[in-house]
Image (spheres, grey):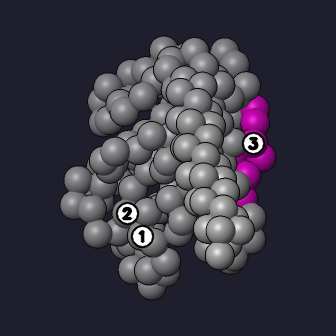
């Protein structure tokens, strides 16, 4: 009986210790992800509309707006018309550290594919780089606390600006020509 109690105590201590170490390691990893202007944008690999993996790094060489949004988000849908206008204006532009501009749309619709695809159509999001963050992976990596949230990155993957919208975003992009 004593040996069973001893084994149970050892198992309990092991589980608690593992959980504590795992939480500490996760906190340490999160604190090392410093998402500020000038830092490298972390890689994103998510499924696109055709259920294929799409990597943010596949857009290297272009200026990219990483746009976290959802079909159910009114402010996101309102901002989409500005993003479309900016995309059309700059998609073929040569910048200091990039050639062309695109949008990497990260949907937080959590698997609601029909609403997501309808919103893409209705809002005229004509670029091909749409992904869905079903498990909240990219949103956690980019510390998204609300949407819309956006990151503007250059052709080398460096963060140029965070959460610019409308005319403020247009002027920032224009400044890199």
Furthest residue to the bottom? Answer: 114
Q: Quadrant of residue 3?
A: bottom right
Marks 1/3: CA distance? 23 Å
140 and 118: which is toward the camera: 140
Residue 109, numbered circle? 1
Residue 57, numbered circle? 3
Mark 2 or mark 1: name the one nearer the start of the chain. 2
Q: Which residues are magenta?
A: 54-61
- In the picture, measured across the screen, residue 97 lies left or right of residue 5, that is right
* Label 3, residues with CA under 10 Å away: few <14, some 14-19, many ≥20: some
Mark 3 or mark 2: name the one nearer the start of the chain. 3
Secondary structure found at label 1? loop
53 and 31: which is toward the camera: 31
Q: Looking at the picture, does residue 147 appear above or below residue 115?
A: above
Marks 3/2: CA distance? 22 Å
Q: Which residue is mark 2?
A: 70
Q: Quadrant of residue 70?
A: bottom left
Furthest residue to the left? Answer: 74
The image quadrant where one finds the C terminus is top right
Identity of the residue drawn at 58% across and 30% down: 28
């Amino acid at each position: 009986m004593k040996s069973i109690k001893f084994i149970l105590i050892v198992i309990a201590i092991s589980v608690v210790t593992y959980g504590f170490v795992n939480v500490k390691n996760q906190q340490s990893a999160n604190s090392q992800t410093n998402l500020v202007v000038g830092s490298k944008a972390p890689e994103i690999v998510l499924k696109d509309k055709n259920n294929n993996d799409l990597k943010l790094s596949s857009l290297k060489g272009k200026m990219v707006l990483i746009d976290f949004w959802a079909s159910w988000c009114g402010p996101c849908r309102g901002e989409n018309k500005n993003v479309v206008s900016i995309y059309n204006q700059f998609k073929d532009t040569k910048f200091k550290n990039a050639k062309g501009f695109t949008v990497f749309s990260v949907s937080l619709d959590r698997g609601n594919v029909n609403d997501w695809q309808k919103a893409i159509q209705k809002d005229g999001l004509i670029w091909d780089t749409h992904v869905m963050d079903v498990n909240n992976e990219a949103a956690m990596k980019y510390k998204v606390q609300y949407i819309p949230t956006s990151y503007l990155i250059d052709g080398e993957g460096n963060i140029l600006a965070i959460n610019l919208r409308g005319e403020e975003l247009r002027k920032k992009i224009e400044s890199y020509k």
